Image (cartoon, helix red, strand yellow):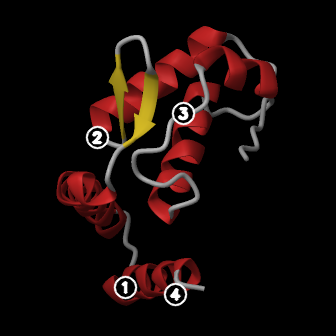
Amino acid sequence: MLSLNLRGSRPIYEQVRDGLRRLIITGAIPAGDKLPSVRTLAGQLAINPNTIQRSYEALEQEGYAYSVPGKGSFAALPQDVTHKRREELLRQLDAIVQELAYLGVAPAEIAARCTRGAEEESK
């Protein structure tokens, strides 16, 4: 389900959040499906339950999940999140493109990387 790099520099909660986000976006976890309980997922991944809770909270803030008190966390409908997340990612992309341009990267190279990334994702 999720693979983590416990020795990497990225925080574990971000890796869990990103992995779950990808599963929700791709439909591997359908909208409305219950996410594994915090304790269950923590046990499967052999990490602290607080780390999983932090990941779930981040997913809720981004709109990819919602919680029902006493029931657990559930995958949100992708269309509910799409516009908000798209705008956030485009703002981040704008900032990255500006920094790359400042560092002397040619616009053609930036465009080529974007095109290549989009093509790889659609495979």
Earlier residue among tags 2 and 1: 2
**Tag of residue 44:** none
**Tag of residue 14:** 3
- Name the foreground residue: 19 vs 120: 19
Earlier residue among tags 2 and 3: 3
Residue 3 at x, y percent in the picture: 76, 44
Helix, strand or loop under label 1: helix
Q: Residues within 10 Å of mark 2 (few under 14, many from 20)?
A: many
- Name the foreground residue: 104 vs 55: 55
Give the residue at x 48% y 55%.
30
Of the residues tagged 2 and 4, which is closer to the observer?
2
Q: CA distance from mark 2 to mark 3?
A: 15 Å
According to the picture, the residue beneath numbered tag 1 turns out to be: 111
Number of dots carrying numbers: 4
Of the residues tagged 1 and 3, which is closer to the observer?
3
Residue 90 at x, y percent in the picture: 24, 62
Give the residue at x 48% y 52%.
24
According to the picture, the residue beneath numbered tag 4 turns out to be: 119
* Mark 2 residue type: Gly
According to the picture, the residue beneath numbered tag 2 turns out to be: 63
